[in-house]
Structures are given as structure tokens and as C-alpha cells.
């Protein structure tokens, strides 16, 4: 029985979706099917619709056209609490209620696994403890979330989603506020979840080099459309960055790690070029 | 002295159910005491006897059953209802200063009663609870429709604003009626401060069952309130239907507040302050705030009503006055102690 539930992996897929807010359409004909057990990273300029796409995939926003399918079924027709047991979402910039402790916040991640008859169990307790230790926040367990630093808070929210123990994990800018070391640690942790435990992750990132370094599958968005997707090796090029972000940058390969790095050159480089 | 100065650096919130048995015991204690005190003080033994093996031939038993028990029950129900409704309001609006009166319920009730007494000349106190109930529900409906017309619809914020506007407006009209009509004011003075004295207990047979259902519903919904307090998107991601949940919570709040106002008049203070006091001790998880708030609210109102009954015999002070008079300094003291 226990094995059976481990083997089961859920698939999430967006098929030709259009979505937006009160009359204004943001997404246009977006198709996305994050590969199983891999890390899909979504990049694109501010306001291009990354969060909107993530929210639509997580059934928080209903598409005006097209479908979001969970295991082949329209996600909006499924029981929302049952969906929450296989699909976790960290929205962009969540705010914790005043005074809620770290442990209490992380414990809310267990909500989809509980019911009137099934209250708090040892399994819930274990999930919360392990999520807190993975996110490195065990030492703050009894502090109020609103007394922590921005980065510490962000890790609490990540821990909440981890405690949910879902196959599919959607994270909207989980690395904001984190220092570089912690960003790298978090990305290592998240890729570990995908590669070692078969979880499927979709992550919105703004750090381009981090995205190129960690994406199995990279997706670039612009003005509500997906303009490129594939492995970083295939699509993470200077031309594309110029096209999508309007950014002048060199893409180099770090000889030691073999990873791609984006080195922007702004006005300064152009000035020196002009001077020559 | 030594007890008060113990270090309070890291406050571990009371865990789980550990405080509930003690509070239940306290509630039973003040409940019995409430019945025992009065113009003719009765021994606690007699009170228990009257409650467990009632003998209609014993005069003291009749006093307990017919005169004092109803009022004690009323205090429990009203205290628990207002406090629980306040806790839910604070959670659903994410506003720590929210209270049940915020939706215009209490002012609506007061307005209806004042209006009925002044214009239509209703003077029968027996009709008052029903008029109050109608006023509370009418105000709730009015607030709901006003907030529906606001761009963005009936969100907690738009309902709070509409509630504040309706309350302010009706409050002014009440003052106006008072100015124009001295007699109304004389008649309703006590009712308008919130009072438990001389209430018609048969009312509880009608209003009690829905209020009890709402109390149970509120406690069952409490874990979801914490999830809701983390924001709509997080809550929806965790599988909460936020629209449905908010509607359920508002229904619970409306039933409890309208019922409490019908039973005891527009009693303020409890719904705002008791949930805060509870929060100081149990933390910010509504799973615990809500049941504790119900218990502490009941204990508080019963205790306060004891004071109201015995403070200056043979007269009685209106319960609503004592509620805030005793409560405000107590609240300040607790906040100072816990948040050092
Ligand atoms: N709740 C909302 N109501 C109305 N419009 C919205 C709402 N949220 C976002 N938008 C609009 O939709 C568009 C896409 O927003 P979205 O949040 O998806 O962008 P994003 O790619 O996540 O940007 P960022 O990188 O800044 O987070 C923007 O033009 C934004 O103004
Ligand atoms: Mg965004």
C-alpha cells in the first residue's frame, strides 16, 4: 500500500489556456507540461504573466479558455482539497498573520491531509519537523514569523509547502530576500526533491544565472506567451535574452561546473565601446 | 510579588487542550456562584441540589430554577456567542480590531428597538428581542448589499467599511430620536447598555438552538480560519474554498450576534477584547483561539454579571456597564504583563 502511493506521480498540464483579471487578458494560448520528476523554471520580465500562469495552473484562477489538466482531468472539476494533497503552491509574497509561530505556519501545510475524523497525527508532526529542518528553520520554531528577517520568513513559507508533501510543487519566486548562499542551498534542495524523490517542480525565478544553472527545463515568457522552452543549453542564449528581456548580456559557460552564466553589460560597456 | 516577576522572555503558547479542563471547571464554578449570590444568598450545596434533584416544595429550589438559573444560562450563552463571533470576525477580516458590531449588527438592533418604541409606541418589553433580532438581520442584509455594489464585491474589507458606515449612520439617527423624544430614552436606557436582568427566558427556546448550532459550527470551522488568515491565495492552494468559507463564517457571526443582541441588548466590549486576551495566552492559531474565546467569554460575562448583581444592593447595575468598567483596566493590565 505505502509503495503504491509512492509510485503514483501526478501530472499537471496546461492546454491552450487564456487567463486574466476582470476583463484584461494576460495569458494567450499558453501550453505547458512540466516534465515528471524534473525542475521547470519560468523566467520572463516583470508583468509578463508568470504569476498568473502559476496561479492558473494551481486552480486559483480559472482560465477563460483552454484547460488545466491534473492527471488528464480538468482541475476545476476536481475536489479542491484532494487536489491540495498532490499539488502545492507558494504564491508570490505571502503575508503571515501577526503572531503566528513558525511551527504553526508550517503546520498549516498539513491542512489538506486532515479532516474532521483525521486530526493531527504523528505523520503530520514528522512532516512538519522534517520540512522545518530541511528549510533550516528549526531553531526559530517557536518564534513569531513576523519577528523574523525577510529571508528567514521566506524559508518558513517554503517549509510550509514542503510539509504539504505533494508530488507537484509550484513556487513563485521562492528565492526573493535570500542571500546568495541560501538561494543556492534552496535550489540544491529543490532539485534534490525532483531528482531523488521524483517530485515535479515549477519555479518562477528572476536570477537568470540561477535559472540556467538549475533548470532541467527552462521556459521563457514574454507578454503572456511562452516564447521559448527547452534545456538551458538549447535556449539560454544572448540573442534570446535580448529578445525576451531586452537585455544586453553575454552568456558564458563556467569551465569548472559547465553551467551557463549570464553576464549583463549595460550602459557602461556601451559607453566604453563608443569611446573606442 | 515573586509570582508576578517571573521571567516572561519566551512565551510558549499553551499547547493543545491543556487549558480547557481548567477553564471548564472555572465556568462551572462561576456559574454556581452566580446562582448562589443575590438578595437571598444560598449555599452552593443547595444550588447543586436544586439543579440535580429539584423539589418544587422547597422554596430555595424554586428560586434557583425559576429566577436565577435562566439568567445564568443567558450569561453563558451571550458571553460565549459574542466572544466567539468576535474571534471569527478578527480572523476572517485579518483585522485585530474587528468585532461582531462591525457589520452593523448591534447598531441595527438598537436602531430597530429605539424606532419601534418611539414611532410605533411599542412599549412591551416582551417584543423587544424580536425587534432587535429583526434590526440586526436587516442591518446585516443592508451591509451586504452595499458592499456588493462596491467595485470588487462583498470582500471582508468592503463589508467592514459598509458596516462602519451603516453603524455610524444608524447611531446618529438613534441620538436624534433620543433628542426629540425624551420618553424613549428613559424607557430604553437600561436596555441600550446591554442588560441581563428581567430577560424573558422563553426566548432562549427559540433562539437557543440556532445559536448552539452556530457555536458548534464556529468551533468546527476554526482550523480553516487560520488558513484563511494567511491570505486567499495560500488558503486556496491548501484546498480551502475561500468564498464558501467566508459565507459560512459570516452566517455564524450573524446568527450569534443577532441572537446575543436579542437576548441581552447591544453588549459591547466582549467581542473585541476577550479574543485578544485569549490570543495573549494561546497564540495566533484560531484552532485554539476560537474554543478558548467561547469559554473565556462565558466565564467573563457570568463573573461580570455577579458583580452587577451584588455591587450596590439592593440596586443592580446594568451588566453592559460593568462589562467595560471592569474589563478595560483588566485588559490593559493583561496586555502590559504579557507583552513586556
Ligand atoms: N489581481 C490582479 N488584478 C488585475 N490585474 C493583475 C492582477 N495581478 C496581476 N495583474 C496584471 O497581470 C499582468 C501579469 O501579472 P503577473 O503577476 O502574472 O506578472 P509576473 O510575470 O508574475 O510579474 P513579476 O515578475 O513582477 O512577479 C500584469 O500586467 C499585472 O498588472
Ligand atoms: Mg509574479
Image (cartoon, rainbow, N blue to C red):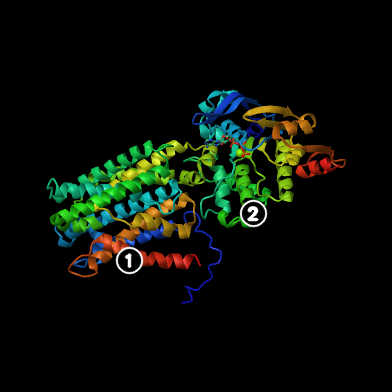
| Numbered badge on residue B137 | none
Q: Residue B17: x, y in percent? A: 47, 54
Examine the rendering and report whether any part of residue B291 can be seen: yes
Tell me which residue sits at (35%, 41%) in the image. Answer: B251
Question: Helix or strand or loop: what does disc 1 sit on?
Answer: helix
Q: Is residue B206 above or below residue B278?
A: above
Tell me which residue sits at (40%, 43%) in the image. Answer: B158
Q: Residue A132: x, y in percent? A: 64, 50
Tell me which residue sits at (46%, 68%) in the image. Answer: B337
Examine the rendering and report whether any part of residue A216 can be seen: no
Q: Residue A99: x, y in percent? A: 52, 55
Number of marks: 2
Look at mark 1 in the image and give the residue it sits on: B326
Q: Quadrant of residue B216?
A: top left
The reply to the same-chain question for discs 1 and 2 is no
User: What is the chain identity of the residue bearing mark 2?
Assistant: A
Look at mark 2 in the image and give the residue it sits on: A138
User: What is the chain identity of the residue bearing mark 1?
Assistant: B
Q: Quadrant of residue A110?
A: top right
Q: Which quadrant is the N terminus of chain A positioned in?
A: top right
Of residues B204 and A95, the one drawn nearer to the viewer in this rendering: A95
Of residues B195 and A174, the one drawn nearer to the viewer in this rendering: A174
Amino acid at each position: 500500500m505505502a509503495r503504491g502511493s509512492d509510485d503514483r506521480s501526478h501530472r499537471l498540464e496546461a492546454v491552450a489556456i487564456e487567463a486574466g483579471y476582470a476583463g484584461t487578458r494576460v495569458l494567450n494560448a499558453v501550453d505547458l507540461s512540466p516534465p515528471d520528476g524534473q525542475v521547470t523554471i519560468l523566467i520572463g520580465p516583470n508583468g509578463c504573466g508568470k504569476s498568473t500562469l502559476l496561479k492558473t495552473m494551481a486552480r486559483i484562477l480559472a482560465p477563460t479558455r483552454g484547460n488545466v489538466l491534473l492527471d488528464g482531468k480538468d482541475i476545476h472539476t476536481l475536489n479542491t482539497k484532494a487536489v491540495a494533497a498532490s499539488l502545492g503552491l507558494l504564491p508570490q509574497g505571502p503575508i503571515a498573520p501577526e503572531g503566528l509561530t513558525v511551527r504553526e505556519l508550517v503546520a498549516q501545510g498539513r491542512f489538506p491531509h486532515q479532516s474532521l475524523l483525521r486530526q493531527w497525527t504523528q505523520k503530520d508532526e514528522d512532516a512538519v519537523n522534517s520540512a522545518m529542518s530541511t528549510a533550516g528553520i528549526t531553531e526559530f520554531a517557536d518564534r513569531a514569523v513576523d519577528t523574523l528577517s525577510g529571508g528567514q520568513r521566506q524559508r518558513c513559507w517554503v517549509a510550509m509547502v514542503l510539509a504539504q508533501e505533494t508530488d507537484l510543487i509550484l513556487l513563485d519566486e521562492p528565492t526573493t530576500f535570500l542571500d546568495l548562499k541560501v538561494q543556492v542551498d534552496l535550489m540544491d534542495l529543490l532539485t534534490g526533491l525532483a531528482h531523488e524523490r521524483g517530485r515535479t517542480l515549477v519555479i518562477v525565478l528572476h536570477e537568470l544565472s540561477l535559472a540556467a544553472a538549475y533548470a532541467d527545463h527552462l521556459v521563457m515568457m514574454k507578454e503572456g506567451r511562452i516564447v521559448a522552452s527547452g534545456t538551458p543549453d538549447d535556449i539560454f542564449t544572448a540573442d534570446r535574452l535580448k529578445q525576451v528581456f531586452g537585455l544586453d548580456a553575454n552568456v558564458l559557460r563556467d569551465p569548472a561546473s559547465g553551467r551557463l552564466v549570464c553576464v549583463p553589460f549595460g550602459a557602461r560597456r556601451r559607453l566604453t565601446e563608443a569611446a573606442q | 510579588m515573586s509570582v508576578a516577576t517571573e521571567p516572561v522572555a519566551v512565551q510558549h503558547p499553551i499547547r493543545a487542550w491543556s487549558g480547557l479542563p481548567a477553564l471548564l471547571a472555572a465556568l462551572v464554578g462561576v456559574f454556581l456562584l452566580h446562582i448562589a449570590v443575590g438578595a437571598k444568598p444560598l449555599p452552593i450545596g443547595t444550588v447543586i441540589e436544586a439543579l440535580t434533584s429539584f423539589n418544587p416544595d422547597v422554596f430555595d429550589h424554586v428560586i434557583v430554577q425559576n429566577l436565577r438559573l435562566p439568567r445564568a444560562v443567558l450569561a453563558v450563552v451571550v458571553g460565549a456567542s459574542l466572544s466567539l463571533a468576535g474571534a471569527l470576525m478578527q480572523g476572517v477580516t485579518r483585522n485585530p480590531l474587528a468585532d461582531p458590531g462591525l457589520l452593523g449588527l448591534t447598531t441595527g438592533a438598537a436602531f430597530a428597538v429605539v424606532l419601534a418604541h418611539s414611532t410605533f409606541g411599542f412599549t412591551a418589553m416582551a417584543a423587544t428581542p424580536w425587534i432587535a433580532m429583526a434590526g440586526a438581520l436587516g442591518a446585516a442584509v443592508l451591509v451586504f448589499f452595499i458592499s456588493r455594489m462596491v467595485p470588487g464585491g462583498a470582500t471582508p474589507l468592503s463589508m467592514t467599511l459598509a458596516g462602519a458606515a451603516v453603524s455610524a449612520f444608524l447611531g446618529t439617527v438613534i441620538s436624534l430620536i433620543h433628542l426629540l423624544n425624551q420618553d424613549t430614552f428613559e424607557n430604553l436606557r437600561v436596555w441600550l447598555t446591554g442588560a441581563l436582568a428581567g430577560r424573558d427566558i422563553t426566548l432562549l427556546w427559540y433562539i437557543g438552538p440556532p445559536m448552539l448550532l452556530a457555536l458548534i459550527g464556529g468551533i468546527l470551522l476554526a482550523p480553516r480560519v487560520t488558513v484563511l488568515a494567511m491570505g486567499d491565495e495560500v488558503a486556496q492552494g491548501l484546498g480551502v474554498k475561500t468564498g464558501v468559507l467566508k459565507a459560512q463564517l459570516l452566517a455564524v457571526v450573524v446568527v450569534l450576534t443577532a441572537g446575543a443582541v436579542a437576548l441581552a441588548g447591544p453588549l459591547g466590549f466582549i467581542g473585541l477584547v476577550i479574543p485578544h486576551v485569549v490570543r495573549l495566552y494561546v497564540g495566533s492559531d484560531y484552532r485554539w483561539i476560537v474554543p478558548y474565546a467561547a469559554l473565556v467569554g462565558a466565564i467573563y460575562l457570568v463573573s461580570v454579571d455577579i458583580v452587577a448583581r451584588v455591587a450596590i444592593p439592593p440596586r443592580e447595575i446594568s451588566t453592559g456597564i460593568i462589562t467595560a468598567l471592569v474589563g478595560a483596566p483588566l485588559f490593559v493590565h493583561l496586555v502590559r504583563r504579557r507583552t513586556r
